[in-house]
Amino acid sequence: MTDKTVASFAEVADLAGKDLGFSEWREITQDQVNLFADATDDHQWIHTDPEKAASGPFGAPIAHGFLTLSLLIPMWSELFDVSDVQTKVNYGLDKVRFTSPVKVGSRVRMTVTITEVSEVKGNGLHLVADATIEIEGEERPAVVARFLNRFYK
C-alpha cells in the first residue's frame, strides 16, 4: 500500500495531477457477495449460487459490479484525507464503467489520480479523482470511475 496523502484545506488546490498510489488488496468473499445481495435484493444466480455459477460464463460466482464500486469509499479513505475541514462530501460519480467481472476469491485494489480541484461557493473545494479498481493478476480492471468529492472549511 502507498502511504496515505493527508493535506490541509489550503494544500488541496495544489494536488491536481497527483497520483495517490495504491490501496491495500481486498479479497472478495462469497459471504460478502451474499450480504450485498441481501442488502440490495439482487440474488441473481451468477452472484449467489456458486454451483450454478461454476458452469456459467465466468466459471465462478462474480461480485456485483456495484459491490466492487462500493469498495471505492474504504479504499479512498486509505489513500487520501483532508485534515482541517468541517465537512467531507461524496459528491457522486461522473462516469463509471464495469470493465471486467470480479470472481469470488479474487483480490482487488484501487489506484487514484486527482485530476482537478476547483473552488466551491461557501468556502469549499470540489475535487475530481480518476479511480481504477484492479483485479490481482488480471490485465483489465474491474471498475474505472471518475469520483467527485467536496470539502468545506
Image (tube, helix red, strand yellow):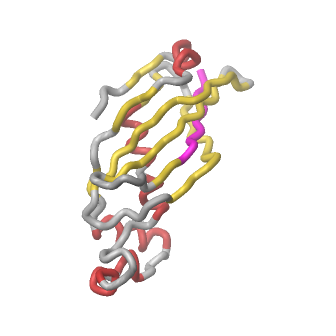
Image mark count: 0
User: Is residue 152 a member of the stretch shown in magenta?
Assistant: yes
Image height of 86 relative to 47, above or below:
above
Image height of 131 relative to 107, above or below:
above
User: Dominant secondary structure of the magenta stretch?
Assistant: strand
What residue is at 63 percent from the left and 29 percent from the top?
126
117 horizontally vs 120: left or right: left
Q: Quadrant of residue 38?
A: bottom left
92 horizontally vs 83: left or right: right
Q: Position of residue 6 (x, y in %)?
A: 41, 22
43 horizontally vs 29: left or right: right
Q: Position of residue 111 (x, y in %)?
A: 41, 39
Q: Position of residue 102 (x, y in %)?
A: 37, 63
Residue closest to the far right? 121
Image height of 71 relative to 41, above or below:
above
The quadrant of the image that shows the N terminus is: top left
Q: Position of residue 64 (x, y in %)?
A: 44, 67
Residue closest to the far top? 10
What residue is at 64 percent from the left and 46 percent from the top?
94
Q: Quadrant of residue 29?
A: bottom left
Instruction: Pick the residue in front: 18 or 68.
Output: 18
The quadrant of the image that shows the C terminus is: top right
Q: Quadrant of residue 16?
A: top right
Q: Which residues are magenta?
A: 145-153
